[in-house]
Amino acid sequence: MSELNPQAGKYSRVLLKISGEALMGDQGYGLHPPTVSRIANEVKSVHDMGVEICMVIGGGNIFRGLQGSAQGMERATADYMGMLATVMNALGMQAALEQLGIHTRVISAIRMDEVAEPYIRRRAVRHLEKKRVCIFAAGTGNPYFTTDTAATLRANEMNCEAIFKGTKVDGVYDKDPKKHDDAKRYDTVTYDEVLQKHLGVMDASAIALARDNDLPIIVFSLDEPGGFRGILAGQGTYTRVHG
């Protein structure tokens, strides 16, 4: 893991992808303000290192399109509802970050000018250059695409050097470590291995898009205090998905 510079010189611009469920803490639904604040502090600690950060947050803590579809709802309608849930999460994270003094922009792929900026790539890049945190909401703006794919798309468009995927475990395992004591964690794994072994890092479309653009994915535990900053400082435990 020595490829990470102790001064975070390896990565000057990254995208942090987290699930909507990460925001609900021990609740079964919605946003848990102390949890949102804790994650915002993690983002601030990396922002303070001079790293430019953009974020994509899922919407599963409020509404998940696939579940709605499975229950008989038209898939496209269910997906649009899921996109709106991501906007709510983005606004919640924006509020938490701005309480910490971090200038933040919520940028939506679906126009809703009263609450978020429309997605314009050059404007978003300029925000990052001005050290503002950009939270990309509403997925790609299209149904049938997950927030994993949206995160990979935006990371490529913003010329990010890596996607940091915050999860509940400290990397990619060959099986669920919470169910199997003998689960083995990978230090590194290739995109093709993730697809062939169905390791569940991201959906296949996102992995293929990352592979085609040689965009590394760093999978780490968002529950580990200081974990995000630690990895950028060359410490911590994680799995690097690469070519």
Image (cartoon, helix red, strand yellow):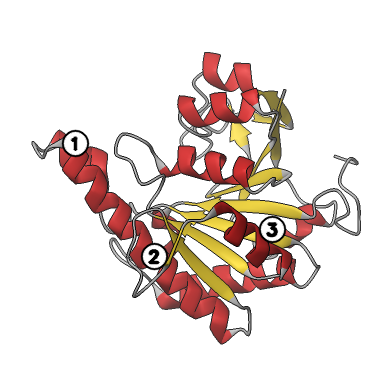
User: Residue 136, how many percent across, how many down?
Assistant: 49, 57
Give the residue displayed 55% in from the left and 86% down from the top. 99
Q: SS at mark 2?
A: helix
Q: Which residue is mark 3?
A: 228
Q: Amino acid at mark 1?
A: Arg
Residue 65 found in image quarter: top left
Query: Disc 1 versus disc 3: distance between alpha carbons?
Result: 34 Å
Report, in whole angstroms, how far the alpha carbon at label 2 lies from the one at label 3.
20 Å
Q: Can residue 37 be seen in this snapshot?
A: yes
Mark 1 or mark 3, whichever is nearer to me: 1
Q: Which residue position holds label 2?
A: 89
**Callout 1: 10 Å neighbours few (<14), some, many (20+)?**
some
Point out the tag, 1 or 3, that comes first from the N-terminus: 1
Pick the front one: 205 or 115: 115
Q: Relative to 101, say whether 161 is above or below.
A: above
Residue at figure coordinates x 47%, y 25% from the top left: 204
Front-lying residue, 9 or 140: 140
Left or right of 193 on screen, residue 235: right
Report whether residue 24 is seen: no
> Could you tell me how far apart the alpha carbons at marks 1 and 2 are, in whole angstroms?
21 Å
Left/right placement of residue 88 relative to residue 34 reads: left
Instruction: Answer with mark 2 or mark 3, whichever residue precedes in sequence.
Output: 2
Amino acid beneath label 3: Phe
Q: Position of residue 42 (x, y in %)?
A: 64, 68
Task: Tell me if 40 is positioned left or right of 146 in this view.
Answer: right
Q: Nearer the viewer, mark 2 or mark 3?
A: 2
The residue labelled by disc 1 is 75
Asked which secondary structure carries label 1, the reply is helix
